Image (tube, rainbow, N blue to C red):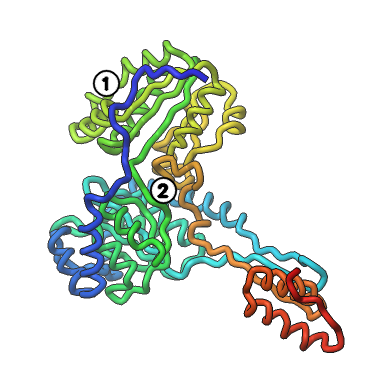
């Protein structure tokens, strides 16, 4: 397959966090040792906030009252869609059992984590949708304790819309803490909260590194890098919509790659012509991010046919994958590596990011080659069980004893021996490795 790069990135996004690792490790160590008092000190230092960290019912009600009615309706709409899709996912978590051999039954059972810690970015933007995506799925999965944690604004606190979204989606507690101190407080069970079994939700490089360090001690949704998006478009695509979608994703951050893969040179050239003025027309901070992302990380790739386009897309394994091309069913059947797929110009990444129902916490940095996004399944433990009659245990014990001795694990073998001796005292067995 041949590929022509009409625009090639000059930089590659990276998930290397070595420059922040020592800082994050120090903060985690100090908070674990110092407990609530240490977390409070970091809240004063980084969040510039000295208000109540664990919101009371009265504070939640007061914040909810500040949210405009139309915004409440929009949040309720998005929550209903995400909840409906999550409930569909939950239906796929079936408990099953099978009689492996006569008399021995093995099974699988799905059990939700007890406590989920949901980090919701605040910062420059109020990430209302992140509250909806993380808290709703945890609630549908059946987590008994759901903690929503979001950075407070200096002297103000958490944005009321985030509090409202967290509350209606099912958060049991809302914690006004940002960054590493917020993640640490959930992981270590500070301020009277239960220790989180799993930490989910997007965040900056410090939040991501805290989750990386804590992984193993607690579960996490995924290791997150810069968000990325790829559009597959053919001659039937509308270049204005393609360009707008690329710019819309580029505004995420200066290092957020956007890629256009097409088999139509005229379309590619028109899109490249349209993107710069669309970026310039954004508000200043959005424009700065999008301009840097387009300049340094964006690529426009010309392919010989749609099979080559699909192959290139699977190679990049984008977090968000949009298809604006003919024969959408072919693409749905062919494409294999993506976090979330958007078929046709009638849908777009922003729909999934905010309100359509699928989750927006997705694998980045080509992790879509082996992982999917946040779902009810992330909060579930798939465990196994077995039971047997004595006759059912007999052939299993014989095989276990011989295999164990072949491996040199005599203690394992004897746990089988003792059962055969007890259950079948009048029989003789060949239990030695040959």
Identify whether 95 is placed above or below 425: above
The answer to which of 174 and 4 lies nearer the viewer is 4
The residue shown at (41%, 58%) is: 220
Residue 43: image quadrant is bottom left
Residue 346 shows in the view:
no
How far apart marks 2 and 1 lie (CA) works out to 28 Å
Helix, strand or loop for disc 2: loop
- Is residue 322 found left or right of 427 in the rendered image? left
**Which residue, as the protein is rendered here, is positioned at the far right?**
426
- Is residue 156 found left or right of 407 in the rendered image? left
Number of other residues with Cα within 10 Å of mark 1, as a class: few under 14, some 14 to 19, many 20 or more:
some
Identify whether 271 is placed above or below 221: above
Residue highlighted by disc 1: 276
Identify whether 381 is placed above or below 411: above
The answer to which of 80 and 245 lies nearer the viewer is 245
Question: Percent x, y for residue 57?
Answer: 30, 70
Residue 316 shows in the view:
yes
The answer to which of 41 and 106 lies nearer the viewer is 106
Kindly check if marks 2 and 1 are in contact, taking CB atoms under 8 A apart as contact.
no
The residue shown at (42%, 11%) is: 266
Question: Percent x, y for residue 328?
Answer: 57, 27
The residue shown at (76%, 65%) is: 100
Question: Percent x, y for residue 385?
Answer: 65, 71
**Which residue, as the protein is rendered here, is positioned at the far top?**
266
- Is residue 350 found left or right of 309 in the rendered image? left
The answer to which of 193 and 131 lies nearer the viewer is 193
The residue shown at (61%, 33%) is: 333
Helix, strand or loop for disc 1: helix
Number of other residues with Cα within 10 Å of mark 2, as a class: few under 14, some 14 to 19, many 20 or more:
many
Residue highlighted by disc 2: 361
Question: Percent x, y for residue 19?
Answer: 22, 50
């Amino acid at each position: 397959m041949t590929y022509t790069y009409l625009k090639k990135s000059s930089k590659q996004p990276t998930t290397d966090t070595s420059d922040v690792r020592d800082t994050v490790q120090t903060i985690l160590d100090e908070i674990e040792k110092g407990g609530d008092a240490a977390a409070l000190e970091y809240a004063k230092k980084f969040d510039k906030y000295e208000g109540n960290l664990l919101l009371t019912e009265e504070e939640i009600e007061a914040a909810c009252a500040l949210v405009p009615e139309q915004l409440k309706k929009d949040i309720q709409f998005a929550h209903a869609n995400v909840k409906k899709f999550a409930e569909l996912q939950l239906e796929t978590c079936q408990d099953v059992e099978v009689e492996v051999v006569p008399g021995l039954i093995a099974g699988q059972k799905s059990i939700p984590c007890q406590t989920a810690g949901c980090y919701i970015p605040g910062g420059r933007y109020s990430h209302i949708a992140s509250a909806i995506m993380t808290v709703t799925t945890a609630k549908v999965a059946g987590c008994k304790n759901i903690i929503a944690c979001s950075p407070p604004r200096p002297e103000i606190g958490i944005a009321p819309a985030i509090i409202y979204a967290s509350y209606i989606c099912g958060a049991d507690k809302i914690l006004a803490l940002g960054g590493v101190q917020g993640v640490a407080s959930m992981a270590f069970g500070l301020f009277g909260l239960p220790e989180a079994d799993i930490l989910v939700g997007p965040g900056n490089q410090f939040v991501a590194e805290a989750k990386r360090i804590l992984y193993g001690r607690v579960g996490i949704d995924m290791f997150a890098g810069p968000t990325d998006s790829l559009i597959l478009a053919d001659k039937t695509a509308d270049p204005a919509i393609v360009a707008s979608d690329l710019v819309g994703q580029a505004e995420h951050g200066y290092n957020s790659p956007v890629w256009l893969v097409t088999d139509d040179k005229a379309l590619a050239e028109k899109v490249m012509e349209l993107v710069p003025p669309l970026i310039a027309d954004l508000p200043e901070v959005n424009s700065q991010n999008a301009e840097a992302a387009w300049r340094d990380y964006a690529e426009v790739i010309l392919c010989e046919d749609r099979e080559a386009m699909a192959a290139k897309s699977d190679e990049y394994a984008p977090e968000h994958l949009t298809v604006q091309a003919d024969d959408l069913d072919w693409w749905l059947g062919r494409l294999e590596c993506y976090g979330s797929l958007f078929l046709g110009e009638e849908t777009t990444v922003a729909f999934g990011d905010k309100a359509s129902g699928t989750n927006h916490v997705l694998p980045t940095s080509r992790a879509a080659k082996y992982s999917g996004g946040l779902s009810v399944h992330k909060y579930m433990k798939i465990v196994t069980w077995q039971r047997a009659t004595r006759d059912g245990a007999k052939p299993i014990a014989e095989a276990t004893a011989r295999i164990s001795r072949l491996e040199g694990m005599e203690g394992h073998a004897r746990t089988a021996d003792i059962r055969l001796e007890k259950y079948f005292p009048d029989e003789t067995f060949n239990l030695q490795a040959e």
